[in-house]
Amino acid sequence: MSEARQFIGAGNAQRPFYVGVDVGGSSVKLGIVDDLGRPLSALSVATEIAEGPDAGVRRIAAGVGQAMADAGLQPAQITAIGLGTAGTIDAAAGMLLGPVNLPGWENFPIRDEVSKACGLRVLYTNDATAAGYGEFWVGSGRQLTSMVLLTLGTGVGGAIIIDDASLDGSHGNAGELGHTTIDYNESARQCGCGQRGHLEAYVGALAVVDRARQRLAGGSPSSVQERLAQGEPLTPRVLAEEAEMGDPLALEIVWETADFLAIGIVNAMHTVDPAGVVIGGAMTFGGRDASIGRRFLDRVRSEVRRRALPALAQRTTIDFASLGSDAGFIGAAGLARRAYGRVEPHRNP
Amino acid sequence: MSEARQFIGAGNAQRPFYVGVDVGGSSVKLGIVDDLGRPLSALSVATEIAEGPDAGVRRIAAGVGQAMADAGLQPAQITAIGLGTAGTIDAAAGMLLGPVNLPGWENFPIRDEVSKACGLRVLYTNDATAAGYGEFWVGSGRQLTSMVLLTLGTGVGGAIIIDDASLDGSHGNAGELGHTTIDYNESARQCGCGQRGHLEAYVGALAVVDRARQRLAGGSPSSVQERLAQGEPLTPRVLAEEAEMGDPLALEIVWETADFLAIGIVNAMHTVDPAGVVIGGAMTFGGRDASIGRRFLDRVRSEVRRRALPALAQRTTIDFASLGSDAGFIGAAGLARRAYGRVEPHRNP
């Protein structure tokens, strides 16, 4: 929420300004971003999927108005809106096609509807690409000339940015790294998509919890068991907390998750060979803010070094994302800037 | 050899002209290529690795002179040379670094040495990229806006071409698809690189032969056994021939190879989402010229459709390469054309 945060004032910000909008299944994050990628305001509104996409667009437009007011700006001072949504999209047509976590919003011309409701041009992309571009522009990837972002949550998403251009793919599905196979065997774990052996079936939040559940059912002693006995649900957070306290079972799950993630990262490295890989999302055991999160990252790094081609093992950087849940709206604004703002491409050093 | 082939005459060819050179472990293929990607001449010279890189450069220069004479051209009529080699390379520095199949040629400034010996500018790239660009420019990929090439031989290589640009990667190692993991388990097959579970350990020529050997050792009855009893070595060609004749064991190996290849293809599709995938190299069971090769391709296609995201399953084309062993020198010439010739990028429709 905007009250709790420090934003750059409109007087100190670098014009021109952009709006970034990141539409998720439960909330829409949006804000005003300046030409250097700094937010002037940011807020979150409930998506309220059940009310339908037209109501959703009205809520987005109201949120955009609020964000402009918070930043002390008029619509005429905004160059364009960058809009990212989850789900399969047709970016060229501006259509939200089959959004798994936005049921009832299928085949909705969201780009043009948001443009009409806000009176501004809209650049439309998917949320993973937006987050990837945000990290590349002003986040952990800002020193990288090319970057792969892996977003770990319930789903495992990805984005590939090369020389200031997102690699969208011929059919808009590049970067679907969660659905690459790391185990072709029939015995492999089943993914949410129905296939077996996908990366997401090992490092997605549901998979991590399920792997822990299986070990607990196998009778491994663990302080996690005590928390479940107190009625707590088994969550990645519980696992992270108990791993932080040194519980062997929870630690085992963390190290295994790191090892699986490293395999997916090396596959992406051997395919697109980015300058660096950035890991974001909730499923990072606290990320850089937790000791166990940092040890998770160390384990990922050493496992990547062990598995990668020698030419890449030491040279490809592996880091946590740094923009948190702001990455999507900031990146969407950055993509709008690239499309409608300055003509010169942004080049990382 | 040039005698047996029909080439376009210099009078009918479209200027400007380029030389393409493709340096492999046993032979160097080279030729003159016109502005539309048509060879005016082509020949093959022995690499003679043991004589060292300086002698190799002299042999290449003599071959280039011969190819020009065959085409009825003078050096002044050539715009530039495109040079592709196997191995790890530093394209920007023009250095051959650590070529596995060119022992003794390490850290050799091959680009500048070839340039000096031939008196022409040289564009330097790796052989997989050259072959990929050849197929994209005038081969199976000529209708595609983006393409992944998988080359199946002893090694499994790859190249990624997007909008007339090869994706080389930040460290020159993009497209190393043979070294992506499709089975993370300890029990997975070992790759030539030492790691386990890589695609190459399943669909490379040595892997295919080894998988057949294991089945034969398991006692499966097969006409392959009879050929080995007659003193023939077990080769992919023997397997292709016996599969063509309907031998169940050989057929099983062909279908399994198709299934493994499909997993690697889908991983590449879910990472870069190309318009199409092109499969080249010797390890294709005869390719489009053999009934079993075409059935192999059908099996790859149906397995890709079964495994790929619905948005991609029907829309991504899967085809055999069409330039055979000419792809490398034609593509190298095409990359020289892109670097030194016409300014406008080549755009497939």
Image (spheres, coloured by chain):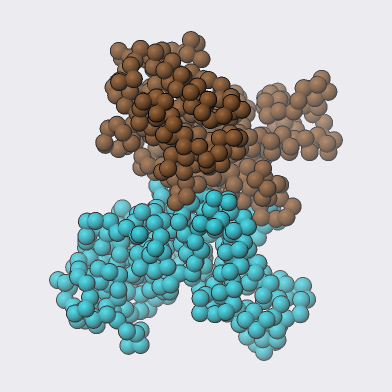
Chain colours: A brown, B cyan
| Image point (58%, 50%), residue name | B309
Q: Residue A286 in the image: x percent, y percent? A: 60, 26
Q: How many marks?
A: 0
In terms of depth relative to the viewer, which is nearer, A32 or B24? A32
**Residue at 51% in and 63% down:** B318
A213 lies above or below B298? above
Asked whether residue B9 is in view, the answer is yes
Q: Residue A98: give x, y in percent of width and height.
A: 56, 41
Front-lying residue, B269 or B65: B269
**Res A69 quadrant in image:** top left
The answer to whether A163 is drawn above or below residue A341 in the figure is below
Image location (x, y in percent) of residue B192? 57, 62
Q: Residue furthest left?
A: B76
Q: Residue furthest bottom?
A: B230
Image: B340 above or below B328:
above
Give the side of residue A154 with respect to residue B66, left or right: right
Figure quadrant of residue B263: bottom right
- Asked whether residue B161 appears in the rendered view, the answer is no
Which image quadrant: the C terminus of chain A? top left
Q: Quadrant of residue B297?
A: bottom right
Which of A318/A302 is in front? A318
For this rendering, which residue is in front, B132 or B266? B266
Does B74 sit left or right of B142 as displayed? Answer: left
